[in-house]
Image: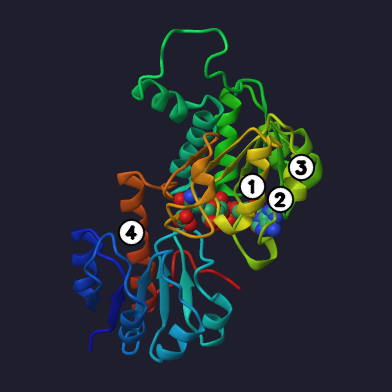
């Protein structure tokens, strides 16, 4: 008998065909709308495998319903939406899609850094709204990227890929991470710094660490006050790492200069979010890995991880707890 698989969002045809050649597949057919919670809770009851996105909370309640589940394959590198401890206790394998999205996400992180530094969105709005009366010396002036100091918090795959971009701009790079990586310091010409030092010395602070309850609001009022008044905060990791209320106050008061955000505590961002009222914030709808090529690679990898587990092979990207 074929294993049963549930997919929480419409996948490209190539992946559906591949899955269907091995398994009995049911899918939430929408591309833009997440599977409703009650549908997910019902669908997991009978299945052996689940392919999910970062919008699906796979928690104790889901796992309790999923009595036959053997594998949860997330089409994302971050896995804070999955209770991996609870899954491990039940012997359920959890997989993610690291590596294939590294360069694309580093590109977006650097794009956000440059866009924010040079006020690109503000400048475009200025022109479109007819405010551009004449060229003037200090009009829409931003911060230099070339030769500035970049501080990376969470130095893993994407952090390292970001360094390659920064080196092309002759940036001085500081990093702070859970583990110090001396061989990378030598190889890439970067320097380790304690969190407070990094915050004080950086012109750009980029967050690239995974979210967990331990790093909830790692960047709050005190940390923002340590930063230079000319500094820019970039978050392409997870929204919960930054205290958004504290960030709003810091930006409004001029304690830091600007912020570039791809991720938020609540996604989608509500339209009355205070940060949306500030000109010195660039906000994107979580598009870090959103190139056609990379999203196809992520979907293929998620399918391959699930297929491997259900056909008795080793998963390519198991998450160890
Ligand atoms: P990674 O290779 O696992 O790198 C994460 C790094 O963060 C690791 O080096 C890790 O240290 C470090 N770290 C973990 N906990 C930390 C802590 N408490 N304090 C300081 N550093 C800590 O992951 P990645 O592939 O670079 O991805 C990083 C994150 O980016 C993902 O988890 C995801 O949330 C986010 N992301 C967002 C998008 C987007 O669309 N915006 C796209 C892709 C990824 P160790 O080396 O000691 O483990
Ligand atoms: C995106 O945020 C991911 O974790 O893949």
* First in residue order: circle 1 vs circle 4: 1
Q: Name the residue under label 3.
A: 225
Proximity of marks 1 and 2: CB atoms separated by less than 8 Å: no
Q: Which of 174 and 243 is in front in this view?
A: 243
Question: Label 1 vs label 4: CA separation?
Answer: 34 Å
Left or right for 206, reference 181: left
Q: Residue at x 81, y 40 (%)?
A: 197
> How far separated are the C-alphas under marks 2 and 4?
29 Å
Q: In which quarter of the image is residue 268?
A: bottom left
Q: Can residue 242 be seen in this view?
A: no
Look at mark 1 in the image and give the residue it sits on: 247
Residue 238 on image: x %, y %: 55, 55
Label 2 CB-ligand 1 distance < 8 A = yes
In three-dimensional space, the C-alpha distance between marks 3 and 1, rounded to whole angstroms, equals 10 Å
Q: Which comes before the other along the chain, label 1 or label 2? A: 2
User: Which residue is at the front of the view, 97 or 223?
Assistant: 223
Q: Can you identify the residue that label 4 sits on?
A: 299
What percent of the width, then of the height, locates residue 43? Answer: 30, 84
Residue 90: mark in rendering? none
Residue at image point 41% right, 11% down: 133
Q: Quadrant of the C terminus?
A: bottom right
Q: Quadrant of residue 46?
A: bottom left
In whole angstroms, how far apart are the C-alphas of marks 4 and 3? Answer: 41 Å
The residue under label 2 is: 177
């Amino acid at each position: 008998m074929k294993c049963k698989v549930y997919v929480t969002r419409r996948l490209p045809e190539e992946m559906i065909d591949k899955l269907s050649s091995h398994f009995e597949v049911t899918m939430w057919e929408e591309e833009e709308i997440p599977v409703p919670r009650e549908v997910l809770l019902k669908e997991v009851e009978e299945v052996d495998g689940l392919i999910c996105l970062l919008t699906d909370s796979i928690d104790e309640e889901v796992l309790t319903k999923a009595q036959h589940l053997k594998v949860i394959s997330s089409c994302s590198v971050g896995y804070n939406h999955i209770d991996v401890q609870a899954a491990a206790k039940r012997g359920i394998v959890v997989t993610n899609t690291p590596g294939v999205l590294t360069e694309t996400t580093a590109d977006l992180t650097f794009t956000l850094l440059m866009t924010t530094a040079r006020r690109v969105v503000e400048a475009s709005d200025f022109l479109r709204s007819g405010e551009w009366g004449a060229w003037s010396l200090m009009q829409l002036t931003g911060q230099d990227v070339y030769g500035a100091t970049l501080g990376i918090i969470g130095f893993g795959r994407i952090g390292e890929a970001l360094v390659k971009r920064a080196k092309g701009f002759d940036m001085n790079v500081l990093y702070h991470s859970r583990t110090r990586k001396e061989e990378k310091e030598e190889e890439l010409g970067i320097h380790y710094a304690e969190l407070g030092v990094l915050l004080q010395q950086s012109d750009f602070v980029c967050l690239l660490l995974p979210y967990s309850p331990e790093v909830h609001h790692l960047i709050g009022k005190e940390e923002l006050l340590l930063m230079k008044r000319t500094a820019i905060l970039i978050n392409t990791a997870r929204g919960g790492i930054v205290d958004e209320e504290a960030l709003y106050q810091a930006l409004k008061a001029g304690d830091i200069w600007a912020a570039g955000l791809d991720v938020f505590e609540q996604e989608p961002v509500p339209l009355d979010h205070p940060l949306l009222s500030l000109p010195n914030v660039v906000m994107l709808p979580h598009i870090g890995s959103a190139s056609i090529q990379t999203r196809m690679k992520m979907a293929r990898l998620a399918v391959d991880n699930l297929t491997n587990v259900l056909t008795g092979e080793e998963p390519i990207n198991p998450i160890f707890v």
